[in-house]
Image: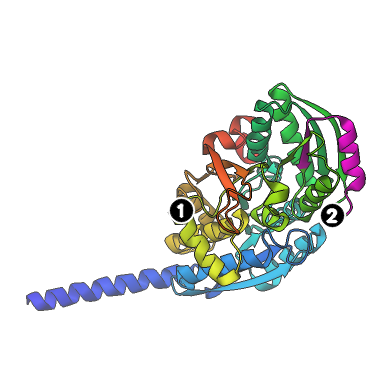
C-alpha cells in the first residue's frame, strides 16, 4: 500500500510538473524566444560592440542551455550602419514579420531613440547596452526598454569631477554633433560648473570625422587646461592621435576622454594614452569573477571584452532568467520581473533596474597605465575608485521620465 501511495504521489508530482512546463511554454509566443541583435557591425563603433557583442550574446544563450522551459532561443542580427532610419525599419520588420521578443545591442544614441519609439508603439522590449545618452532613460524613457551598461551622467560625474578636483578647472569641449555628444557635453558642463570650473569654448564635429586637425588647433588656441572629448569610438581615437601629433599634451594641456573604451586604449597604445583618466562600467581585470568570464570570451574572440560586450552577456542572462521564471515572453511581464530582481554578477555590483528603466550599478574611475606598469598587452587600466551605484547615476528626483513623474 505504501509503495502504491508513493507511486501515485510521484505520478501526480510528475504530471503537475509537466503541466506547469506545458503552460509555461504555451505562454511563450510561437514556442520560441527570438532575440534581434542590432548594432554598428562595420563602422565607427564596430569594435566596442559589433560582432564581439553578438558573440557575447551567443555565449549567454549557450551558458543558459540554448532554450527556456523547452522553447528554443533564436538569434538574428543586423548592421544599423549608425542610421536611425535603418535601425527603426529593421526593428519594425523584426516585430512585424519575425515576432522578435527582445532587441539587444543598440549603440548610436540616435539609433536607440528611434528604435525605442518603435518598441513602445508595438509593445516590444529592448535592452540598450551600447548607447551613452542619459536622455534614453530621462526624457526619452519608455516602458519598453532598459538601459544597462552606462550613460553620460556617471561618465561626467566620474571623470570630469576627478579632473576638476585635480585643478583642471578650464575646459574646451570637442563634441560629436548628435544626441550622445550633446548629452555628454551637457552633463560635463554641469559637473564642471558645479565644482567651480568653466567651459571656455566648445566646438561640435560631424559624426563620424576622420580629420581632427582644425579642431585640435582651436582647442590649443583656447587656452583651456583641459580638452574634453565628448565623442566615442573611432572619433575619440582620431582626436587623441591628432592631439598627440600636434603636441597638445606636451604644450601643457590635458586630454579628458569622457567615453573611452578598452579597445580604444589598446588600439592607440599606452605611449599615447598613459595617464588618461576615464570612467568605466566594468573592467575585465577587476577581480577573479571578471577575469574568469573575460578569459572565456578571449578564447573565442582573441580580444578582451569591452564593458559593452560584457554588459550584453549580463543583460541577456537577466532577461532569459526572467522569461524562465515567469514562463512568458510578454514584454511587461518580463520587464516587471527583471525590475524585481537584483543584478549581482561578474559584470554588475549592487545592480537594480529603476522605474525609469535605468539599470544602476557601481561604476569605476580608472587611469590608463604607463608602459612600464603594464604586465601584458591587455593590462591597461588601474582602478582608482569605485563610484557607488546610488551616487553614479542621475537621481530620480531630477528625472524628466514620464514613468517617474506620472
Vertically, is 177 above or below 64? above
Q: Indicate the position of residue 214 as horizontal and vertical percent values.
A: 92, 44
Q: Residue at x 71, y 21 (%)?
A: 196
Nearer to the camera, 405 or 46? 46
Residue 322 can be seen, yes or no: no
Nearer to the camera, 143 or 5? 143
Residue 350 can be seen, yes or no: yes
Q: Quadrant of residue 111?
A: bottom right
Q: Is residue 70 magenta?
A: no
Image quarter where the N terminus lies is bottom left
**Label placed on residue 208:** 2
Magenta range is 211-229
Element carrying mark 1: loop
Q: Is residue 65 left or right of residue 232?
A: left
Vertically, is 105 above or below 212? below
Q: Which residue is mark 1?
A: 345
Q: Residue at x 79, y 38 (%)?
A: 250
Q: Are marks 2 and 1 in contact (CB under 8 Å)?
A: no
Q: Residue farthest to the left?
A: 1
Q: Is residue 221 magenta?
A: yes
Q: Residue farthest to the front?
A: 372
Element carrying mark 2: loop
Give the mark nearest the N terminus, 2 or 1: 2
Q: Indicate the position of residue 397 as horizontal and vertical percent values.
A: 60, 29
Spatial CA span between label 2 and label 1: 34 Å
Q: Indicate the position of residue 336 as horizontal and vertical percent values.
A: 51, 51
Amino acid at each position: 500500500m505504501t509503495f502504491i501511495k508513493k507511486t501515485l504521489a510521484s505520478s501526480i508530482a510528475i504530471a503537475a510538473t509537466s503541466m506547469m512546463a506545458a503552460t509555461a511554454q504555451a505562454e511563450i509566443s510561437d514556442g520560441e524566444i527570438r532575440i534581434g541583435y542590432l548594432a554598428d557591425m562595420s563602422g565607427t563603433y564596430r569594435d566596442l560592440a559589433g560582432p564581439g557583442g553578438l558573440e557575447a550574446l551567443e555565449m549567454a544563450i549557450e551558458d543558459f542551455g540554448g532554450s527556456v522551459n523547452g522553447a528554443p532561443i533564436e538569434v538574428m542580427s543586423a548592421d544599423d550602419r549608425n542610421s536611425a532610419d535603418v535601425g527603426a525599419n529593421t526593428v519594425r520588420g523584426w516585430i512585424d514579420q519575425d515576432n522578435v521578443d527582445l532587441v539587444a545591442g543598440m549603440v548610436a544614441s540616435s539609433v536607440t531613440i528611434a528604435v525605442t519609439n518603435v518598441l513602445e508603439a508595438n509593445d516590444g522590449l529592448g535592452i540598450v547596452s551600447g548607447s551613452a545618452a542619459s536622455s534614453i532613460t530621462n526624457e526619452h524613457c519608455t516602458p519598453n526598454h532598459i538601459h544597462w551598461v552606462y550613460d553620460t551622467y556617471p561618465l561626467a560625474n566620474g571623470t570630469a569631477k576627478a579632473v576638476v578636483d585635480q585643478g583642471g578647472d578650464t575646459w574646451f569641449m570637442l563634441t560629436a554633433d548628435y544626441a550622445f555628444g550633446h548629452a555628454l557635453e551637457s552633463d560635463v558642463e554641469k559637473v564642471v560648473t558645479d565644482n567651480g570650473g568653466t567651459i571656455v569654448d566648445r566646438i561640435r564635429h560631424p559624426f563620424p570625422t576622420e580629420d581632427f586637425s582644425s579642431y585640435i588647433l582651436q582647442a590649443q588656441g583656447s587656452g583651456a587646461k583641459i580638452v574634453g572629448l565628448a565623442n566615442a569610438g573611432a572619433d575619440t581615437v582620431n582626436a587623441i592621435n591628432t592631439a598627440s601629433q600636434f603636441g597638445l599634451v606636451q604644450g601643457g594641456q590635458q586630454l579628458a576622454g569622457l567615453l573611452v573604451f578598452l579597445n580604444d586604449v589598446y588600439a592607440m597604445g599606452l605611449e599615447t594614452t598613459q595617464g588618461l583618466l576615464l570612467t568605466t562600467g566594468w573592467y575585465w581585470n577587476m577581480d577573479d569573477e571578471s577575469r574568469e568570464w573575460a578569459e572565456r570570451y578571449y578564447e573565442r574572440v582573441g580580444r578582451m571584452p569591452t564593458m559593452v560586450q560584457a554588459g550584453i552577456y549580463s543583460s541577456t542572462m537577466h532577461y532569459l532568467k526572467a522569461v524562465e521564471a515567469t514562463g512568458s515572453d510578454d514584454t511587461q511581464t518580463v520587464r516587471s520581473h527583471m525590475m524585481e530582481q537584483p543584478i549581482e554578477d561578474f559584470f554588475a555590483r549592487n545592480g537594480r533596474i529603476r522605474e525609469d528603466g535605468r539599470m544602476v550599478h557601481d561604476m569605476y574611475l580608472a587611469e590608463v597605465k604607463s608602459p612600464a606598469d603594464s604586465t601584458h598587452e591587455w593590462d591597461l587600466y588601474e582602478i582608482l575608485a569605485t563610484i557607488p551605484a546610488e551616487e553614479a547615476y542621475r537621481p530620480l528626483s531630477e528625472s524628466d521620465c514620464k514613468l517617474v513623474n506620472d
